[in-house]
Image: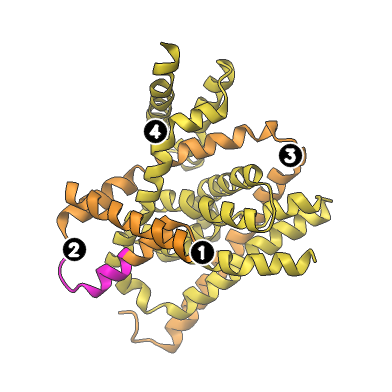
Chain colours: A yellow, B orange
């Protein structure tokens, strides 16, 4: 009996935790710094993890029960084509600055992570798992496999990168005096992939479209270039 | 909206198949997104309302869809590689630095391109 209803309960746990997290986020909206830290992407996973640890449930069971959401994440990724199409007139005039920012941002994300970790004395295995951190999860897992990183570590690193970018991005933009939604969106997409894109759509449709563009392009160029960099570096 | 969801699923399927059979390292949904975008750009007709609604609905709840993946992060502790504490520090610093530098670079490049092509943005 318990085995039959557990998957349903674990799926409900996600929805319940998210609703609670969303409510907390809404009531903290008047204070930007607090509300950033109370983003549903921070609070909901903490709530779920706490319940799983308390009840001694394996992450693999939870993951299996929530497979429909992983599948719909793919569908949502396809859906990003629509805002991209609707906002494309904003993008067409900016080809050159966008491409330059993309190439620089995507390489800098990898190089900065690897050099800081190397200075701190990380092992080659950790360095390799760290390299694809800014790309969207499925791409990162594919790359990690290709360059012999640890897939589970990479998956965690990617998600964490996205959450850090999505929480602190808007605060950084305020601090730097950046008010242009095109810049906010594109940077969120490059540095914080899908999680950043979810955050960007809360700012505006235009911001979300630029984030979708950054997410897609970063995924594509990192997937193509990174294996070569790694092979060359660790040869 | 149902027709719209069907279109999204169709492109997800085409993307998965393309990714699988071409051996490209790009995941299916990203290929599906690119193909749907190209299709929308090429078809001159208005965007179907159903498709717009379906996309809007999916994107509105994008954060919810990321929750199960985010939970995985808390279970990294069980991974034999014990360097994950240092790893989190590296991620925080490198992500923040990359965002600051990338944002400033883009701001500079956009200001510059506006100066050379004053008619482009009006």
The residues colored magenta run B36-46
Q: Is residue B37 magenta?
A: yes
Question: Badges 1 and 3: C-beta atoms under 8 Å apart?
Answer: no
Closer to viewer: mark 1 or mark 4: 1
Residue drawn 55% across the image and 15% down it: A55
Badges 3 and 4, same chain: no
Q: How many marks?
A: 4
Question: Badges 3 and 4: C-beta atoms under 8 Å apart?
Answer: no
Is B75 placed above or below B84 here? Answer: above
For marks 1 and 4, give the CA distance: 39 Å
Tag 4 residue: A22
For marks 3 and 2, give the CA distance: 48 Å
For marks 3 and 4, give the CA distance: 28 Å
Direction bottom: furthest residue: B116
Q: Which label's residue is closer to the chain start, 1 or 2?
A: 1
Tag 3 residue: B85
For marks 4 and 2, give the CA distance: 31 Å
Residue drawn 79% across the image and 54% down it: A124
Closer to viewer: mark 1 or mark 2: 1
Tag 2 residue: B47
Mark 4 Cα-neighbour bin, 10 Å: few <14, some 14–19, many ≥20: many
Residue A40 is situated, as x and y percent measured from the top left of the image, at 45, 36
Is A62 placed above or below A201 here? Answer: above
Chain of the residue where label 3 is placed in the rendered structure: B
Question: Badges 1 and 4: C-beta atoms under 8 Å apart?
Answer: no
Secondary structure of the residue carrying tag 2 is: loop
């Amino acid at each position: 009996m318990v085995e039959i209803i557990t998957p349903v309960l674990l799926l409900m746990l996600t929805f319940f935790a998210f609703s609670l997290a969303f409510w907390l986020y809404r009531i903290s909206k008047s204070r930007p710094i607090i509300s950033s830290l109370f983003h549903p992407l921070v609070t909901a996973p903490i709530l779920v993890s706490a319940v799983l640890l308390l009840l001694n449930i394996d992450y693999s069971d939870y993951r299996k029960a929530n497979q429909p959401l992983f599948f719909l994440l793919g569908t949502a990724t396809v859906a990003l084509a629509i805002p991209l199409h609707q906002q494309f007139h904003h993008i067409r005039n900016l080809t050159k600055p966008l491409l330059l920012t993309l190439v620089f941002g995507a390489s800098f994300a990898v190089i900065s992570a690897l050099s800081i970790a190397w200075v701190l004395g990380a092992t080659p295995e950790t360095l390799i798992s760290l390299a694809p951190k800014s790309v969207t999860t499925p791409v990162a897992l594919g790359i990690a496999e290709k360059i012999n990183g640890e897939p589970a570590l990479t998956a965690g690193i990617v998600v964490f990168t996205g959450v850090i970018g999505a929480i602190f991005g808007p605060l950084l933009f305020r601090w730097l005096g950046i008010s242009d939604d095109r810049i906010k969106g594109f940077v969120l997409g490059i540095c914080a992939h899908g999680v950043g894109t979810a955050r960007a759509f809360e700012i505006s449709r235009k911001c979300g479209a630029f984030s979708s563009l950054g997410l897609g392009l970063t995924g594509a160029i990192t997937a193509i270039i990174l294996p070569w960099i790694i092979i060359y570096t660790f040869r | 909206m149902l027709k719209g969801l069907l279109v999204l699923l169709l492109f997800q399927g085409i993307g998965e198949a393309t990714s699988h059979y071409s051996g490209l390292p790009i995941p299916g949904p990203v290929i599906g997104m690119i193909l749907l975008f190209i299709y929308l750009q090429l078809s001159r007709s208005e965007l179907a309302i159903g498709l717009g609604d379906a996309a809007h609905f999916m994107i509105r709840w994008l954060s919810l869809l990321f929750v199960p993946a985010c939970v995985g992060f808390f279970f990294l502790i069980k991974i034999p590689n014990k360097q994950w504490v240092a790893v989190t520090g590296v991620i925080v610093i490198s992500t923040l630095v990359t965002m600051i530098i990338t944002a400033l670079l883009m701001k500079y490049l956009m200001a510059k391109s506006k100066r050379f092509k004053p008619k482009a943005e009006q």
